[in-house]
Image (cartoon, rainbow, N blue to C red):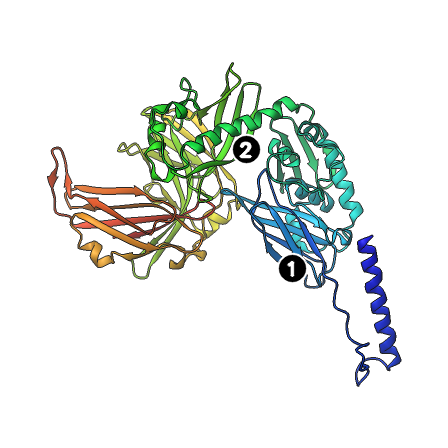
Amino acid sequence: MKSVWRFLKVTAALMAAALLLSSCGGGGGNGGSSDGGGSTPTPTATTLSGTAAAGGPIIGTVTVKDSTTPTAKTVTVPIKADGSYTADLTGMTPPFLVRADGAIGGTEYHLYSAATSADQDGTINITPLTDLIVANVAGAVAKAYFDGGNFSNLSAAQLNTQRDALTAKLVSVLEAVGVTGSVDLLRGSFNPNHTGLDAALDLIRISIDPSSNTATISNLVTTETISSNLATRTYTGNITGVTATAVAELPKIKQVFKSLSDLFATSAPTSEDPRLMALFDQATFLESGRNLAEFLFQITTEPQMVGARYDNIYLESIGSNSAVVTFDVLRNDKPINEGQKPWRMIKKTDGKWYLQGDQRIAFVGLQPTAEYQMATTPATFLTGLNLRVQDRGGRQISAAVFTGKGLTGPVRLTNAADPNWFVIEDPAYGQKDFYFMTDAQIAAMADSNEAYSVELFVGTTRVATYTEKVKKRPYLNSQLSAANFPAVTAPTLAQLRAFNGGTITFNWTLPAGLSSQRLAAGVNDNSGHSAQADSSLLPTDTSKSLTINATAGTPPAAFTPTSRWAWLEARDSFGRNLGTSMW
């Protein structure tokens, strides 16, 4: 009734204005009366509010696009920490398309929703579910519908039809989390706190393939799937196996990660702390080739872990006594891990869940990286992927092969032996493990979550194959300038080149949005002797001293450096590294 009453009031005002103008002979001249009867009415203020979430609040912005032609009006507003947003639609023309851009931890999201005139001053959520509703209305991926701008005929009936069709397919999931089938997936108020509708988002995954114009809804509890043909707006398959018992396990799993976070809240425990060890399955734990003792030593001696928390825990799958989860490690709400990796968990006869690690025999990863070489004139910028492999478990892995979009065929790396890091075999492709990429190669990648295959070999025998995803594709060469990178203010290049060993202090400033990650420096001579120091950094660090003794060999013998180098690395909100190099 509110929107109808507002419509009648505005219509009446416009009719009165039109009659007044006609009585004065149309526009122009001194047609306005002294009592202001010819003035234009002030538009009634309207808003749109809701929640932007995907199993957790999205941190970023919401953009509302209206139906004005030929140039649509848009308004962009920030999303609050709890996922809520409010947009002022004054002067805008319905219907509207809505887009949320942001991240949960280090995972990027671009999700869509829609609203009609009836939704003004109401609630419109933005979730993977609303994104699918809009895609089915459009008969294509929601992004294309938003970008195309041809949605002036969008109606409430269309939205409601697709909302109801999706709700009918998700009844078992909704009932399992205590939500009735009458919930409004588009307009119902909810909090992204892993209860109610938000709990349902924890239990399903929605993926859309633009090439086939098909969406897939995956049930993480039973692996059942539903397929949606966007062109025909039809669903195939059902989800029936979600039970309240299975749903009840997710909070227990998350409690394990909370307990782990609590132990590092103000200081690090010892690696033998019984409270810490009690969270892990000591018999089966394996993390990137490391056993439990090695892993616990690493995290309890890493300065960045103090104050860090494990958050954004998502189910990949869950059974009666096993689960696969992904998570972020956050410090100051910024990810310090290299993207979400799948970890396994086991439920034992005591009813408790225990961490098992990633169960991989070696460390593998792909890290989008850009480098600013200060020492060259003019400055040089490089971008691409760090193809990272380390035989941490000493399993005699000799080679690795990466395959995926943007790579010039399969890329082979070989074991450099010390310290079991792998390097690109063909130097034409890059340096050490840094694979250089052109803008055309980067453009061939998906903007986020591009998947790569990594095969590990002992001799000619393949011993493992893993899938790695790149959270956000690398920076384009055309996007890079010195302003993107940490700016080293001390030492100068001349001071670094005069350094022959001892303690050296680095100072720098950070561009907005970057977090300090790592500092390394070293000295070398012409006979192959070298010495270096390497330190992880706290996200807010802007100064660090390193001690480098110019000695090598056993027993250590002094050498005279003939070259020096330094590497300062920072990380953006998507986990991409930006490094400044000096020599």
Query: Residue 241 in the image: x percent, y percent?
Result: 67, 23
Would you identify the image quadrant in which residue 210 lies? top right
In the displayed structure image, the side of residue 361 where residue 443 appears, left or right: right
Between discs 1 and 2, the one toward the N terminus: 1
Q: Which residue is mark 1?
A: 74
Is residue 504 shown above or below 183?
Answer: below
In the displayed structure image, the side of residue 132 where residue 303 appears, left or right: left
Any part of residue 322 in sight = yes
In the displayed structure image, the side of residue 221 where residue 357 appears, left or right: left
Q: Residue furthest bottom?
A: 29
Query: Residue 559 in the image: x percent, y percent?
Result: 12, 44
Give the label on residue 361, or none: none
Is residue 244 shown above or below 517?
Answer: above
| Relative depth, front residue between 143 and 67 | 67
Secondary structure state at the residue bearing disc 2? strand
Q: Amino acid at mark 2?
A: Tyr
Q: Which residue is mark 2?
A: 314
Query: Residue 464 in the image: x percent, y percent?
Result: 42, 25
Query: Residue 333 in the image: x percent, y percent?
Result: 47, 44
Q: Amino acid at mark 1?
A: Thr
| Relative depth, front residue between 22 and 4 | 4
- For marks 1 and 2, give the CA distance: 33 Å
Is disc 1 in contact with disc 2, using a CB cutoff of under 8 Å?
no
Secondary structure state at the residue bearing disc 1? strand
**Label 2 packing within 10 angstroms: few (<14), some (14-19), many (20+):** many
**Label 1 packing within 10 angstroms: few (<14), some (14-19), many (20+):** some
